[in-house]
Image: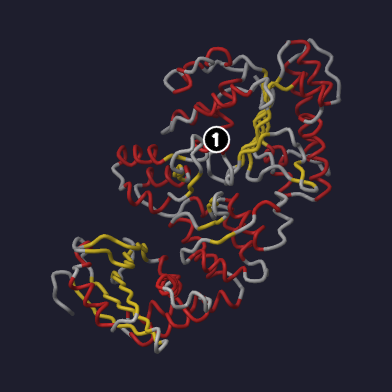
């Protein structure tokens, strides 16, 4: 048992000691691809989406360097007809490229380090052989001795591309080509390869650097979609087990809608790291986005591309944006316009992509909160003004300054809605959400909330730690502002908040197409019907 050649199953043992969600169906997909034209697999996922857990699981299952039957006996893969055929029967080469980069010696490249480490361990694994220094020749020597080709498992495969120079990238791509684009070597020495990272394989002149790989990405996961994150059923079961509110879990962590590989309704996927942290702590909050990925978000949304800042604000306000992801070269350093920015953010998990409409949107509360935080800390003057204006709108609402609220909505309407859509009812809703852009730091925003005898247009529910009033907002078009507050009262919209002990602010906002005027009215209400 080695570190890189035929490793053990310690990583998967640790996973099984915790609360493990059975993702062994992934093993079936990989096993079905072994020694077939589909044997080279590249699966890209955001940080904290379980990539390393998957690699540890595959290593524990395939590696001849351990005995893992007991670890898998109670999992789904044990019922698969191929279970016995592949269980601990393969030579495995396991690389974590982030770890490899930390082990570089001096000016050595990641690919040179990886080659040296593999050759050295082959010599330890097969002391009876005379293993040469050349990587591919050394691997072939072992294959011909054992009669078994290798299963390659490469985690964080794109780390050298993300973090190093163009020269490093070229050397690393040549390293991968030597293994997986070398016809005679690959056919004889590679039973299968499973690479996982954040980005798809880098393209040169529109062609993949290693074109033989089948790629499964956040934009097009195909059969690997259920293994991107936790499914809705899995999260529902976790919530029941931990006594947590599934509706809240959905609001915080749902939103990655990926096509169903069988053509059914889209799959709802949740960020695994965040869900498990919420279950462990008993508290819904932002967990995944408080990692190093935050720096990437701020870096990209600060790009000075024409219209980018407006588009980011629109996303945070709940809009969908049309993008073209197909021209991106899968290199985080080569980001040339807003389309590239949003394509990178889709791979990072900050937006979710709809393949049918070519649109992206912010997936959930966790990510949207991080966008707002990044906008507040950003340096772009237009964004700073937008954030400051939203803070002022919220203060004006608390102070029941209806004129200031109406002026803020009018400013958002004028600045962000084109003339062709200005007199559209949805544009007023968008303007209001934009005017209250930063409210989501303190509130949960809910649209069309069922309550009383109808649906409240917008409800802002205070988060548990926030000692502030709840907001019930009703929008009207070409009607007196009193009719908005009247509808809130007559249809008893506050009923849904009857268990909330704090005060409510009823906010009516109207727009008159004839006069082009926005009007607001604010009324403070305590549940039980008494005004205060």
445 in relation to 75, above or below: below
Q: Quadrant of the N terminus?
A: top right
Residue on which disc 1 sits: 224
122 or 394, which is in the foreground? Answer: 394
Please indicate whether residue 141 sits to the left or right of residue 328 in the image. right
Q: Position of residue 252 (x, y in %)?
A: 40, 53
Tell me: 49 left or right of 102.
Answer: left
Within 10 Å of disc 1 (Cα), the crowding (few <14, some 14-19, many 20+) is some
Along the viewing direction, whichever of 58 and 423 lies nearer the viewer: 423
Residue at 45% x, 47% y: name it.
274
Q: Residue at x 75, y 14 (%)?
A: 126
How is the model colour-coded? secondary structure
> Where is residue 244, by image quadrant?
top left
Q: Is label 1 in a helix, a strand or a loop?
A: helix
Q: Position of residue 196 (x, y in %)?
A: 63, 37
Position of 231 relative to 81 (above/below):
below
Q: Is residue 323 above or below residue 317?
A: above
Residue 127 falls left or right of residue 224: right
Q: Position of residue 143 (x, y in %)?
A: 76, 15
Image x and y of residue 526, in percent:
18, 73
Q: Quadrant of the C terminus?
A: bottom left
Horizontally, residue 369 falls left or right of residue 106, namely left
The residue at 47%/42% (across/down) is 272
Placement of 103 over or under 88, stated as above or below: below
Tally of marks: 1
């Amino acid at each position: 048992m080695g570190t890189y050649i035929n490793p053990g199953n310690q990583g998967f043992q640790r996973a099984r000691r915790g609360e493990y969600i059975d993702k062994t169906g992934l093993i079936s997909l990989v096993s079905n691809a072994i020694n077939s034209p589909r044997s080279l697999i590249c699966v890209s996922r955001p940080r904290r989406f379980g990539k390393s857990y998957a690699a540890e699981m595959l290593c524990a299952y395939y590696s001849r360097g351990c005995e893992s039957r007991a670890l898998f006996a109670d999992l789904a893969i044990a019922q698969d007809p191929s279970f016995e055929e592949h269980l601990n029967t393969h030579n495995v080469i396991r690389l974590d490229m982030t770890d490899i980069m930390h082990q570089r010696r001096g000016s050595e490249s990641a690919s040179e380090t990886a080659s040296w480490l593999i050759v050295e361990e082959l010599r330890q694994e097969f002391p009876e052989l005379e293993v040469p220094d050349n990587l591919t020749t050394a691997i072939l020597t072992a294959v011909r001795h054992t009669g078994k080709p290798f299963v390659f498992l490469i985690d964080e495969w794109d780390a050298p591309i993300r973090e190093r120079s163009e020269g490093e990238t070229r050397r690393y791509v040549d390293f991968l080509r030597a293994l997986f684009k070398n016809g005679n070597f690959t056919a004889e020495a590679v039973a299968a390869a499973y690479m996982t990272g954040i980005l798809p394989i880098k393209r040169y002149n529109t062609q993949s650097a290693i074109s033989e790989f089948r790629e499964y990405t956040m934009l097009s996961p195909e059969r690997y979609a259920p293994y991107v994150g936790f499914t809705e059923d899995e999260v529902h079961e976790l919530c029941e087990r931990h006594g947590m509110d599934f509706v809240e879990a959905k609001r915080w962590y749902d939103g990655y809608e990926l096509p169903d590989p069988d053509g059914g309704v889209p799959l709802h996927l949740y960020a695994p790291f965040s869900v498990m942290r919420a279950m462990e702590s008993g508290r819904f909050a932002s967990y995944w986005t408080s990692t190093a990925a935050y720096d990437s978000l701020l870096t990209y949304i600060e790009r000075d591309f024409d219209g980018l800042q407006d588009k980011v604000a629109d996303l945070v306000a709940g809009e969908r944006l049309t993008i073209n992801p197909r021209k991106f070269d899968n290199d985080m350093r080569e980001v040339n316009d807003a389309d590239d920015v949003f394509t990178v953010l889709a791979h990072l998990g900050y937006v979710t992509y709809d393949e049918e409409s070519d649109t992206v949107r912010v997936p959930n509360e966790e990510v949207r909160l991080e966008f707002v935080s990044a906008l507040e800390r950003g340096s772009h003057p237009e964004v700073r003004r937008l954030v400051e204006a939203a803070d002022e709108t919220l203060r004006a609402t608390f102070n029941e300054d209806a004129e200031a609220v109406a002026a803020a909505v009018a400013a958002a309407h004028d600045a962000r809605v084109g003339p062709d859509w200005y007199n559209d009812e949805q544009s007023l809703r968008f303007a209001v959400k934009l005017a209250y852009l930063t409210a989501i730091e303190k509130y949960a925003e809910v649209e069309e909330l069922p309550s009383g005898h109808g649906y409240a247009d917008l409800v802002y529910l205070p988060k548990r730690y926030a000692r502030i009033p709840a907001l019930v907002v009703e929008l009207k078009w070409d009607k007196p502002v009193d009719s908005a507050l009247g509808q809130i009262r007559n249809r008893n919209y506050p009923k849904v908040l009857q268990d909330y002990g704090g005060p409510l602010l009823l906010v009516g906002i109207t727009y008159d197409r004839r006069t082009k005027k926005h009007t607001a009215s604010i009324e403070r209400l305590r549940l039980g019907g008494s005004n205060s």
